[in-house]
Image (spheres, helix red, strand yellow):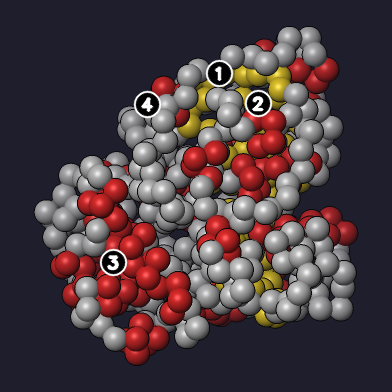
Amino acid sequence: MRPSCRVPLLATALAAAAFAAPAPAGAAGDGSCAHLDRVRVPGAAHQRSACLADLTTAGLAGTPYTDMADQAGLTAAATRSPSGVPGAQIDGYFPDSSRFNDTHGWAHDAQFVIRLPDRWNGGLVVTGAPGNRRQYATDTAISDQVLARGYAYAATDKGNSGVDFHLDGERPGDAVAEWNARTTQLTRAARQAVAQHYGRPPRRTYMTGVSNGGYLTRWQLENHPELYDGGVDWEGNLWTGGRGRQPLTSLPVAVARALGRATDEDMYAAGFPRGSEFLWPYHEKAYWGVTQKIYRAEFDPAYDPGCPGTSAGSTPERILAPCPSDAAYDYASRPASVHRAVQRVALTGRIGRPLITLHGDLDALLPKSVDSDVYDGMVDSHGLGRLHRYYTVEGGTHVDGLYDSHPDRLRPILPCYRSAFDALVAWVERGVTPPADRTVERPADGDVVDSCALDPGGAAAR
């Protein structure tokens, strides 16, 4: 089982129960599913297709076609999402040697889901799972909305999942490098599957994601701009070359504070925002320790071979507990081999397509001052600011589910994300310039769960 509270984005603690293999929910001759049996996802080792009356979570909750448990904590409880989108769903996996993902009882990684709405607008939206979650993690946060707008949708588990993801691969950094390769692989395959299903290739392809999915968005637009028309990055993780600030420099301070070895001033110096202190007790229990130890194990397994060793733990308590040695972890002084491992997956800021970034100013896991602020500067340093918009969401934190515990201090980022996606489409397809970089203020009243105005002079987007 998972921790009963919200599951960390960067460190989903435990696997969900395995699903039974899905069975078709409609006849092969129904509507746009008439020739679904002819659609083959290029490169897939296995796939199963079904015609469904509703591809959104409203219709799929409780079925093998989504996993509500893997979405825990990502959205506010009162979030309103569209429903009633009929179409086809293809679940499957690409060849892979690792077996962390037990969804559908397959015990096979590189799993994916592709959704093909009956009423297609000619576009495709691709994402990768946030944190160490799996392919259904952003069904409420992303899939529901884009399907209702008519987009085909594709998501990947990134090729490894769970808190022991760092055990995948032969050398440090391999597991994270696979995330990027699997996202590229799915994008190419989904574009061809879409063409087979609808009789023509997608007119537009957008990349997007949350947390690690935001990192994937940045990486794809830097390294494979030919596959996409633009992207929306929702507080993406930042891995950089050299010895600059990134999670392995800020999280050790948080671990030290959790162990009573660092002060509030140390936290502020490490980038954690003033005003976020009320969120620290929860992060101390659910985020900081596990996130630091498993990502340090991915890039620097020699630092403390016994922690996490062959596993991050077998119980929630062990998984979430920090490694005491991480309180003294000093990334800057680690061997060059560690920095080379990070460099393999590092971002550069050289985006080749329009990108919109959102980040909450109360993010207590990936503080914006050591993440999106830095990435915005990286983009500008290459003279590419014209392709980037950066919006700070006042009162936003790393997971929207925390709004339910602190509605007087937080606001969900999801409605601003939806508004940003609309702004990206208008930018790419109609040449409408998005608002300049700005802070999206938290309104004193009104519907903060389901509305957000990126432009203070414009109407709230829903």
Instruction: Decide: few, some or many residues near mark 4? Use Cα within 10 Å; few <14, some 14-19, many ≥20.
Output: few
The image position of residue 265, as x and y in percent, is 35, 90
As drawn, the label of residue 89 is 2
Pointer 4 and pointer 3: residues touching (CB < 8 Å)?
no
Q: CA distance from mark 1 to mark 3?
A: 43 Å
Q: Are marks 3 and 2 in contact (CB under 8 Å)?
A: no
Residue 342 appearing in the image: no
Looking at the rendered structure, which numbered label has been put on residue 339? Answer: 3
Q: Are marks 1 and 3 in contact (CB under 8 Å)?
A: no
Along the line of sight, which residue is nearer the eye, 98 or 396? 396
Residue at image coords 50%, 71%: 363
Q: Is residue 333 above or below residue 195?
A: below
What is the spatial separation of the Cα atoms under label 4 and label 3, in whole angstroms? Answer: 32 Å
Q: Are marks 1 and 2 in contact (CB under 8 Å)?
A: yes
Mark closer to the chain start, 2 or 4: 2
Q: CA distance from mark 1 to mark 4?
A: 15 Å
The disc, 1 or 2, on the residue closer to the chain's N-terminal end is 1
The residue wearing badge 1 is: 22
In the displayed structure image, the side of residue 380 where residue 16 appears, left or right: left
Q: Residues within 10 Å of mark 2 (few under 14, many from 20)?
A: many
Q: Position of residue 322 (x, y in %)?
A: 24, 62
